[in-house]
Image (cartoon, rainbow, N blue to C red):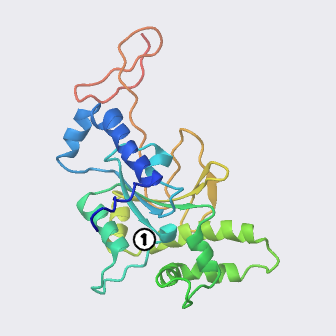
Amino acid sequence: MARGIPPPAPSGALRRLVDGFDRFRGQHFEQDHDLYDALLDGQRPEVMIIACSDSRTDPAIIYGAKPGELFVIRNVAALVPTYEPDHRPRGTSAAIEFGVKALGVRHIIVLGHSFCAGVRCLLEHDHGGARFEFVSDWVNIAREVRDEMDGLVTDAERAVIARRAEQASVLASLRHLATYPFVAEGVEAGRLALHGWYFHFGWGLLQAAESLHGPFRQVDGGTPPAPALGVAEAAPPLPCLRPGPGPARRCDAAGVPARPTEP
């Protein structure tokens, strides 16, 4: 930099990030030493989330996750390409492979959202044009969704078509995910479950796909939805209670709760 010219002042956005890091250190890092000491030994997340790069849909914020709880893959429109081992660099496929093979995640969630610009680009047939050099080819991963939406009645409202396409993109990514041999093997063995979730941030609602072809149902608070593919997670056993008023649960020597008994 030329002598006598002061460096540019940091922007408000960058200053907020630095201030946010200071708050993070004070509220989390310096207050939860056990967690961060454990993370030094490596990560052991049970859940992988494939989410959109959209700045409004950060999975850790939406689900209130702590460091180490989520293995997150983010790309335009939360799309999953089909299994194609062609020795070309494939970031999303590589991350999926690492999460399943190296980390042993138990759940993979494809998280779509409302007002997705990537899905809108897909629907508008923006392919080969000058607007984007890479986005158009990327969203073509879900070209079956565009073909499906093109087959709908032409007088349907654009907003309705967009919401349907966003959910259809989640289902398409789930079906693509199932083409990965190591994913299919994990599902077949009962080690892995696939979920399709849709976040409507205009309404503050979360919906889950009931199968690889839908439909989507609203997620009720405190009730984890069943996976679209795979075995549902078993509910944790009820705690063992000391005898007292009302029914009590006693444990055997192995710590397994016995049948409820009357005091």
Residue 68 in picture, x, y percent from top left: 31, 47
Side of 112 where 164 appears, left or right: right
Q: Quadrant of residue 241?
A: top left
Q: Amino acid at mark 1?
A: Leu
Q: Nearer the viewer, residue 144 or 26?
A: 26
Element assignment for label 1: helix
Image location of residue 57, percent across then percent down: 52, 56
Tally of marks: 1
| Left or right position of 241 against 29 | right
The quadrant the N terminus occupies is bottom left
Q: Position of residue 164 (x, y in %)?
A: 67, 68
Residue under numbered circle 1:
177
Residue 108 placement: quadrant: bottom left
**Does residue 232 appear in the picture of this structure?**
no
Q: Residue at x 42, y 71 (%)?
A: 177
Locate the C terminus and report the quarter of the image it occupies. top left
In the image, is 35 to the left or to the right of 48? Answer: left
The residue lying at 23 percent from left, 34 percent from top is 34
